[in-house]
Amino acid sequence: MAKEEKKGDKKIFKKLTILLWVGFVLVFVGFPVYIWAVSSNTGQLFGELPSYSQLENPEQNLSSLLFSADDEILGAYYRDNRKPVTYDQLGPNLINALKATEDIRFNNHSGIDLRSMLRAAFGVITFNPQGGGSTVTQQLAKNLFDTRVIEEDEKGKLEGINGLLDQLIYKTKEWILAVRLERSYTKDELMAMYFNQVSFGNNTFGIQSAAESFFNKKPKQLNVEEAAVLVGLQKAVTRYNPLRNPENSKSRRNVVMNQMVEYGYLDKAAYDTLAPQDIVLDYNAQDQNFGPGQYFRAEVQKDLIVIARDLGYDLFADGLKIYTTIDSRMQRYAEQAVDSTMRQVQANFFNSLKDGNGKMREPWIDDQGRVIKGFIEGEPLSRTQRYRSLEKEYGAGSDSIDYYLNKKVPMKVFSWKGDIDTLMSPMDSLKYYKHFLQAGFMAADPHNGQIKAWVGGIDYEYFKFDHVRLGKRQAGSLFKPFLYTTAVEKGFSPCYEFVDQPITIPIPGQSNPWAPQNSDNVFTGEKMTMKTAMAKSVNSISARVMDIVKPDNVSKMAGRLGVESEIGPYYSIALGTVDVSVKEMVSAFGTFANKGTHIEAHYVTKIEDRFGNIIWSKVPEKKRAISEDVAYVMLNMLQETTTNGSGARLWREYKITDYNQTENSIGSKTGTTQNGSDGWFMAVTKDLVAGAWVGGDDRAIHFQNWAQGQGAWTALPIVGRFFEKVYKDTTINLQKGLFVRPVNLDMEIDCQKFQDILVPQDSTSGSTIYDPEIY
């Protein structure tokens, strides 16, 4: 009996030994073989893993960032709102919160933390979960390469058969990828990659976007409790979203901070102080309709898409860094100047539309001051996206178009007092919006052509059309400096005198001669210099000068100075009957300040890829347009507008110079078109040129009184307020100073010293002509 028991014990021992050896072989031989099989996708059973090349260059939709000249982020272009940061930009609060909560042994393991895995497994077996076993590196692997989301044609033969088997394969792939990532990157790089990859909800990807969205801070600026909120979001981005579920988010934040206390990253006393406090957000929606330079960002995007595509990049996914010429401080001041001015101008405009009983009439007015019937139903309506969509859906002339255009629906509309929730039809909303005047503003450095500020309208969310580059309107008297530049280049001193009297000029091929009127329909009969005539925008004298220098020469001069729009060689261009943009005019006036050399106005200096390699750089075109002498004479003439002409508010009201311009030279010019539909103003200093336009979306929309729509009252305040703010900001370092007179200037521009010689009147044109050859 004892022998049989011993024999039985030996058999059991033998079986246990065999079982242990089998287990040993399975664990220490079979498991590595299994890992090898998964990593090599043996027999196409498990599906492909990313290659080492893909590990080193993982595919991520990275936002392309737009930087200002003073290194501020102006905005981003993206599919996923993800802005990459480096480890040094994270800050200790984020790093410590993540380690304490997700992976305390992050610095010690090689991608897999065996202790955490065993703890997690034991918790599952005992039905007492002890936390997850995934390391930060494993989570990164899962997020980077979507190990659980596999295309049908990429699946292994074993995948999709059984849910538990799938989970085992997915988890194995994460282990393998985690180890490979650890071999390919440093710990600091992995930490940064994790924070750049994860989602925080609200269309926010990566820690930079999350910090900006929820707290309006950079990641390194986050305090402990803010960092804990964002790290806590990783548990469940909806459940712990601080916007939607603030109490859940607060509870999760405290869990994270408690973990930080446990591992020595936070004092218990600090925790006790912070834990009861509510989450304080400074939410800043990451949307292209918000933030600085919306019009600029939208316009430059069009060019960047083409540049990136030609270089083989995707602007919305490849994490490019675009360095612009915009100064964020000047941009802010420009937007403030437009906002404050247009609030006042709009109020004046509304008041001008009221009759004696206070009732407001429609702003679309003909030359006789009558409201244009059916105006909105014409071209303005046909240009709208809503009308084109309905026409495409129902066909031209369909009654359905009229029905839907006049059907009232809930909508939010713009007002200067704040957005209004209302019930309005698309037709009514179109009429409503046509009552608002628009504006365009740009400032540029004349010496290098770099655009420093760009405001394309009054509110990008509601008015998308850009009035800096896209909008082209008649320039009015703002065009006259190009006429007088042509005359000066031909030898005419700004001190030549002409008589302000009616003029009639026969036009070849036309039965009626050209007989322009002055803006006030009054001819004084007085002599005045070209300098004074330009400062006071006297049309009769501009016409006489045009008759001398001829339209084709003026048209060519405008092109030389920087106007890109086509300008026909017509006599009427002397009075500014040409459509030009704000961008063109600022660029052209900059030629005067740059001593006669025109430099192409531009807004991007270089583009880098995600690794910091320069893939594109801008070399602006430069050309000699006029001589330095001619440029200086024109600056002198423009100064007269500031001193004694329509630009005098610059020194009277805005105090950015004085009457004699003893410390700061400023040349300027206003422009106002027929009926006051367009108001322009341009200011030129030695180092900065700025210009503004104000008007309705359509030329028929204007002040009833021409004087109220003058550029001196609508556009000048924008420029004046801009310079006022810029000069006060010492961090910008825009220095006041004088225009430098060329050493060898031989043209007399001091009209008190000038001795004029009168040449007999031209019998064909009625012009009084001076012969520059005499001098």
Image: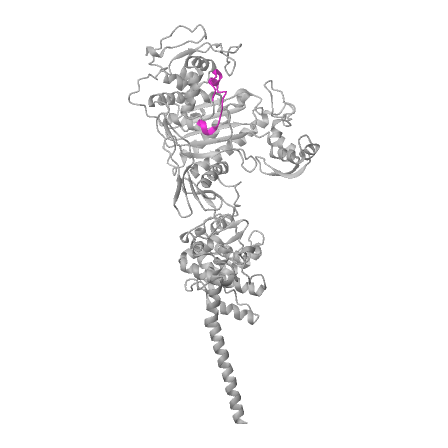
Of the 4 image quadrants, the one containing the C terminus is top left
Q: Tell me where residue 483 sits by quadrant.
A: top left
- In the figure, is residue 715 to the left or right of 729? right
From the viewer's side, name the closer residue of 48 and 23.
48
Q: Quadrant of residue 447?
A: top left
User: Which residue shows up at 35% across the image and 8% down it?
Assistant: 757
Looking at the image, the residue that sits furthest to the left is 743
168 sits left or right of 558 in the view: right
Residue 448: image x %, image y %? 37, 32
Closer to us: 220 or 602: 602
- Specify the segment rendered in magenta: 567-585
Q: Whole-percent x and y of residue 373?
A: 65, 23
Along the viewing direction, whichever of 558 and 721 lies nearer the viewer: 558
Tell me how the rendering is colored. Answer: one colour
> How many numbered discs?
0
> Where in the figure is residue 260, as x and y percent of width and height?
47, 61
| Vertical relation: 705 (above or below) 547 | below
